[in-house]
């Protein structure tokens, strides 16, 4: 259906029907704009606070837009008494209403006629049992707060999104085909039908992640496992400095450390520095090859059956069958 608006010209005769068309055009276009380019909800203010008596709340001034695009304006703070009910929870709602006011007699022979439309908010409490009925329309009856009662007095005033209080805003997105979408509380990037709070079709690049990741699924985290005191690897061979641990002899498990010229395996305590070294250009006065020993001034022992069989002390003396060689 095409929209019509008045075309004024000099000498034109206007009557009530013409002014009705003019007014309806602007009202309709504004509501269509609000309905299609904004999501309904609280646009400004309309905060809810309990009064000291525990029997009423104060709603601050503000504005809301319902799903029909109608503007609900509250000019001044409003007090609203709670319901007398046995139910634990009640909902404070606001809706649009209009009516004819300001009657006047213009001596037209038809008596008093109302001269204005008055648009004003309808603020009321709704019992939870009525709110949860299928025919309750939250798009016209906007929730300002969920109020919990105790002994028929206010206990908690909840104005979070969990209370069904909605905020007005710019559309609900939808521009997809590689862009973004919004569907029933879920956000999609590159998908028009997100099934979770955030669903991305494509590659995600980020420089920071917050949280411990304990709830993440479907992510390959490697084959290392955190255990008490360190980490554990329970599958295959381990390579350090190489992606292909050498195992030509077919050992069951291999730890392969590959360095360019020198390679060191440190086995230390706070006071003892023990090492296994592989070097190509001589080290500690030894020719190229392998060194097993200590950098700190401590003994090196060899043993079998959990018993020390040969010991080299810090001065290089060798003892076989004695842990304290003197020569």
Image: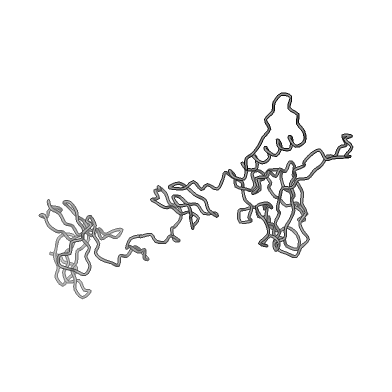
Q: Nearer the viewer, residue 129 or 96?
A: 96
Q: Residue furthest left?
A: 287
Residue 141: image x %, image y %?
A: 69, 53
User: In this view of the protein, which residue sits in the foreground, 178 or 47?
Assistant: 178
- Front position in the image: 272 or 117: 117
Q: Quadrant of residue 171?
A: top right
Where is residue 137? Give x, y as percent.
67, 56
Q: Nearer the viewer, residue 171 or 260?
A: 171
User: Is 32 displayed left or right of 189 in the figure?
Assistant: right
Identify the coloring. one colour
Which quadrant of the structure image shows residue 113? top right
Q: Is residue 282 above or below residue 235?
A: above
Give the quadrant of the N terminus. Answer: top right
Q: Quadrant of the C terminus?
A: bottom left
Q: Is residue 147 left or right of residue 309?
A: right
Name of the residue lying farthest toward the top: 10
**In the rendered picture of this protein, how many numbered marks are placed on residues?**
0
Q: Position of residue 254 (x, y in %)?
A: 21, 65
Residue at the (15%, 59%) spot, across then down: 291
Residue 315 at x, y = what percent? 16, 59
């Amino acid at each position: 259906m095409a929209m019509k608006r008045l075309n004024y010209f000099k000498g034109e005769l206007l009557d009530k029907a013409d002014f009705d068309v003019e007014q309806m055009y602007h009202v309709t276009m504004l509501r269509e704009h609000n309905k299609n380019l904004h999501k309904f909800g609280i646009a400004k203010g309309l905060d809810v606070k309990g009064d000291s008596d525990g029997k009423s709340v104060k709603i601050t001034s503000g504005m809301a837009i319902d799903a029909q695009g109608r503007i609900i304006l509250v000019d001044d703070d409003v007090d609203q008494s709670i319901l007398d009910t046995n139910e634990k929870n009640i909902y404070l709602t606001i809706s649009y209403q209009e009516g004819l006011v300001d009657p006047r007699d213009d001596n037209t022979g038809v008596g008093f006629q109302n001269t204005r439309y008055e648009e004003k908010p309808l603020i009321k409490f709704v019992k939870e049992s009525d709110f949860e009925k299928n025919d309750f329309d939250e798009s016209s009856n906007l929730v300002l707060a969920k109020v919990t009662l105790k002994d028929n007095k206010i206990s908690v005033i909840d104005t979070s999104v969990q209370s069904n209080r909605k905020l007005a805003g710019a559309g609900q997105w939808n521009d997809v085909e590689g862009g973004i979408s919004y569907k029933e509380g879920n956000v999609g990037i590159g998908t028009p039908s997100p099934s979770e709070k955030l669903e991305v079709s494509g590659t995600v690049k980020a420089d920071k992640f917050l949280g411990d990741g304990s709830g993440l699924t479907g992510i390959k985290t490697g084959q290392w496992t955190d255990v008490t005191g360190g980490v554990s690897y329970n599958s295959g061979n381990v390579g350090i400095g190489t992606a292909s641990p050498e195992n030509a002899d077919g050992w069951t498990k291999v730890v392969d450390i590959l360095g360019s010229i020198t390679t060191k395996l440190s086995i230390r305590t706070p006071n003892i520095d023990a090492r296994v070294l592989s070097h190509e250009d001589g080290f500690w006065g030894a020719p190229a090859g392998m060194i097993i020993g200590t950098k700190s001034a401590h003994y090196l022992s060899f043993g079998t059956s959990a018993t020390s069989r040969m010991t080299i002390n810090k001065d290089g003396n060798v003892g076989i069958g004695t842990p304290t060689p003197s020569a």
